[in-house]
Amino acid sequence: MHFNNFKSSFNIRIIILIMVVFVSSIWALTHYGRYILNEDTQRLLAEQQLLTVTMVAANIDAKLQTRLLTLERIAQTISPPLLVNAAEMQEFLEKRPHLQIMFNAGVFITDSNGNVIADIPVSANRIGLNIINSDYMIAALKEGKSSIGQQELGKNLKIPVFCLAAPICNAQGRVIGVIVGVTNLDKSNFLDDFLENSLGKIGGYLLVAPAQRQIITATDKKRIMESLPPTGADPFIDRALQGFKGSAISTTAQGLKALTAATVVPAAGCYVVGFIPIKEAFAPIDSMQSHLMLAASLITLLAFFMTFWLLKIQRVKDTLTVQLVERAEELQRKNHFEQFRNRILGLITEGESLSTVLEAIVLGVEEDNPEILCSILLLDSEGRFFAKAISPSLPDFYSSAIEGLEIGMGVGPCGTAAFTGQRVIVDDITTHQYCLQFQGLAARAGLGSCWSQPIISSSRQVLGAFGIYHREACEPTESEIASIEQIATLASIAIDKFTTSKALQESDELLTQFMLHSPIHAYVQSVTPTESRTIKCSDSFQDMLGMESEEMIGKTMDELFPADLAAKINSDNWAVITGGKAVVLDEELNDRYYTTFKFPIIQGDRTLLAGYTIEITERVQAEEMMQRFNEELQQKVSEQTRSLKESLYRIDQLSEQSHTMIWEVDAQGLYTYVNLMSERVFGYRPEEMVGKMHWYDVFPESERESIKNLIAPVFESRVQILNIENQTTTKDGRNIWWLTNGIPILNEDGSLKGLSWQRY
């Protein structure tokens, strides 16, 4: 609707007039309210801030007075004899730890010359310093009164501090020393209790020394000992330092307008200044004004938008109508495709050939869209060439030219789609670079455009390409692209189903051949808690049961085996199915022995039992024969062992009666055998010598080397030693003379195994 029509309407004019008057009133009220609120708020905030600053100043003054009074009282307890004794004076301070709580930088005492004689904490290292020229020392020593010094950098600590001092007087009232309390402004101190709270987000407090025009401490610790602006830069600060107590608008060091209040701290002669930026102080007023302006703007906009409301509703109605029509068409297309899809799936289920199913897909798409031609191109097993073209509506010469074509980048739209696995849209065959080598062929077939979608299996393997051709050059719509994807997916399902069926058929043929020729007894059974029934088995069962595999299929174990064996088989089978684990069992049938391997297999939603049985009769017979042989051998070994033990006993008896010691060593000279005479002769038990001592260890140390040289040829030439007289040493240190004979012990290959010795 044109705006001139609005002016011709009396009602519209009245509405506009009311709207203008209403909006003007809103704006006038907003500005007036802002003015009144600004004035009242400034007055109230100024009074409130002055009261706050006065309270802070009073609290600081009280804290300072308390600390001065404490120092004065301590000074009164210090006598002249105590003052001249530095050690006792130091001990005097250390016994008053509360002073370090009141003064965070400690306390020290000077003599009348300003020399520090006692100090806590000792780590401050102030003892020996002379501070007589400090302002607080001058007031204490010369004027004899307590004072608060100006802030300064400590002579030793090199940090911003301020000091409180009280004179120490003798009985005649003469000043003989000074006690000084030091506050470190950088660290947390008693002033922070009042100054650390900020006013607003960036406002706060300053404690100012007027004589130096310097900040003693502040809410922002970075401003400690900061110089104030020069005289004339901030009139309010100038007035405050001249004794003015009150509040006003001033400019901060950051250049911000602020509501500032100031008052004096009597004890120190300094000033407390509190400030809050105007922007923060008047933030509620600004917020209220913003809301009023926003409300006025919204009311104005609402008046304008109401005029066009009916047109907006009509436009919404028109949009909804279009969307409903498009939705109905979309549902119709989906229903039609579902019917088409079900028809194709029915062909697949009925077992029709792949060519028949794919041709039905192509013809079905062409039937719904008479203006297009379609083709499905299948790749060979290696995925390099188009092995077959299903394109009943395209000319034969065109399909023949495509079959056998090697795919690749730029090899037509279908060849490129199959090669890249991506959709390819060629809107004009006569100009597109992918179709340069096919332009003549396409012109002869009367084709103007080609859209190709790769056909991809469920395992992401490219199986071929689905192509849609038009007689004229054209581009697909979004719905047409969606249809292309759906048809390619349907073709993929058909190809996957055929490939899977073919693989299953080949697998079944392989299994049948295996079952036919396998020498082991293989089988597959369905199992329930009460029976096991044969589904498939190998022909080798004829050797075990005397029946063909075809006769066994469908029979239960009760029909094939004796009752007790059938019951055991059923129980074992059900345990495998429920346990889900493979087992190995030994079984016996008709005096023949078998080992059976059973394991569960999954087929769809059911669990079957598979297994194979191997005859082990010959192995069992061989094991039984071996067991009998072992038993006979063990009996003979036992007899020989008993005979050997009897012989050894007789030898031990003979050696004991003849006082003969028999022993053997290996090729390295280490004892490998010693008879019982060793304990009577040497005092060593056989177990103390065998494997632990060499033959020369029993000889006196002074003769060992000569004995080694004498016996060495025996180890080298492997000859006998006869009637060697030698001396040996017993365990308790006695020396005994012996007559020794030795013979070499050889391995089967003639190498030296050791020596056998006799001593008399």
Image (cartoon, helix red, strand yellow):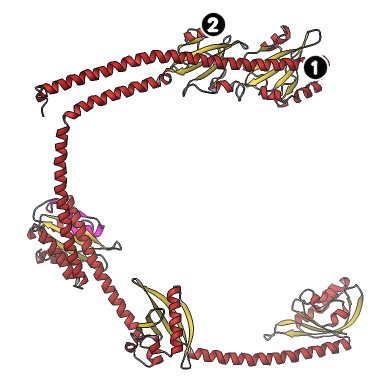
- Residue 93: image quadrant is top right
Q: Tag 2: residue type? A: Gln
Q: Position of residue 311 (x, y in %)?
A: 14, 34
Secondary structure at badge 1 equals helix
Whether residue 426 is visible here, answered yes or no, is no
Secondary structure at badge 2 equals loop
Image: 395 above or below 558? above
- Residue 692: image quadrant is bottom right
Q: Where is residue 28 in the image (x, y as percent from the top left)?
A: 28, 15
| Residue 425 painted magenta | yes
Q: Tag 1: residue type? A: Leu
At label 1, counting other C-alpha atoms closer than 10 Å, the crowd grade (few under 14, some 14-19, many 20 or more) is many
Residue receiving disc 1: 83
Classify the position of the C terminus by image quarter.
Answer: bottom right
| Residue 356 painted magenta | no
> Do callouts 2 and 1 mark residues in contact (Cβ within 8 Å)?
no
Q: Position of residue 537 (x, y in %)?
A: 36, 84
Residue span colored magenta = 405-434
Image: 266 above or below 594? above
The residue shown at (39%, 91%) is 545
In front: 660, or 680?
680
Q: Position of residue 668 (x, y in %)?
A: 75, 76
Would residue 488 be found to the left or right of residue 140 on screen?
left
Would residue 469 be found to the left or right of residue 256 on screen?
left
Residue receiving disc 2: 242
The residue shown at (75%, 90%) is 644
Whether residue 140 is visible here, answered yes or no, is yes
The residue shown at (49%, 90%) is 617
Classify the position of the N terminus by image quarter.
Answer: top left
